[in-house]
């Protein structure tokens, strides 16, 4: 039973490392667009928002995006984070204030 638990932990760690590599391959055009919008609207940087998201939910960032809220309500950075238990979370960071707006478990 102990070996099965060790194998499961190794498998989860391997999966998390692969997810980290996928994050490094984010589209350069998307990153430029995010930076352009954040600078133009005086928003916090993607790196600052990511640090806030990882404080709220430690793990590996699988995806990041900058979303315009409906009806001119502002902007949110949206992060998909995989935690140590291989559970995926969505974390929304207010792009103006850096406050965590929402943390939800991704069920899919």
Image (tube, helix red, strand yellow):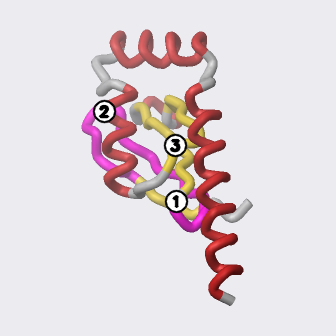
Disc 3 secondary structure class = strand
Q: Is residue 89 left or right of residue 108?
A: left
For this rendering, which residue is in front, 91 or 25? 25
Q: Earlier in the sequence, mark 1 or mark 3?
A: 3
Q: Residue drawn at (64%, 53%), measured in percent from left and top?
A: 14
Q: Earlier in the sequence, mark 2 or mark 3?
A: 2
> Residue 72 at x, y = what percent?
44, 29
Badge 1: how crowded within 10 Å, few (<14), some, or many (20+)? some
User: Which quarter of the rendering shows the C terminus?
Assistant: bottom right
Q: Return the mark for residue 48.
A: 2
Q: Is residue 12 above or below residue 53?
A: below
For this rendering, which residue is in front, 88 or 68? 88
Q: Earlier in the sequence, mark 1 or mark 2?
A: 2
Judging by the rendered image, the residue that carries numbered circle 3 is: 61
Res 4 quadrant in image: bottom right
The nearer-to-camera label among 1 and 2 is: 1
Q: Residue furthest right?
A: 108
> Residue 103 at x, y = what percent?
46, 58
Badge 2: how crowded within 10 Å, few (<14), some, or many (20+)? few
Q: Is residue 60 above or below residue 49?
A: below
> Does residue 92 show up magenta in the picture?
yes
> Residue 40 at x, y = what percent?
36, 10
Judging by the rendered image, the residue that carries numbered circle 1 is: 83
User: Which quarter of the rendering shows the N terminus?
Assistant: bottom right
Magenta-colored span: 84-101
Q: Residue furthest front?
A: 3
Q: Is residue 59 left or right of residue 63?
A: left
Res 86 quadrant in image: bottom right
Q: Is residue 51 above or below residue 74?
A: below
């Amino acid at each position: 039973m102990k070996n099965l638990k060790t194998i499961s932990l190794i498998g989860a760690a391997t999966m998390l490392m692969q997810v980290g590599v996928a994050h490094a391959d984010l589209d350069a055009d998307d990153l430029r667009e995010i930076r352009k919008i954040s600078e133009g609207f005086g928003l916090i940087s993607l790196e600052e928002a990511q640090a806030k998201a990882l404080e709220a939910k430690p793990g590996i960032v699988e995806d990041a995006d900058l979303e315009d809220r409906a009806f001119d309500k502002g902007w949110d950075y949206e992060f998909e984070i995989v935690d140590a238990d291989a559970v995926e979370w969505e974390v929304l960071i207010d792009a103006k204030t850096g406050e965590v707006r929402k943390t939800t478990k991704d069920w899919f």
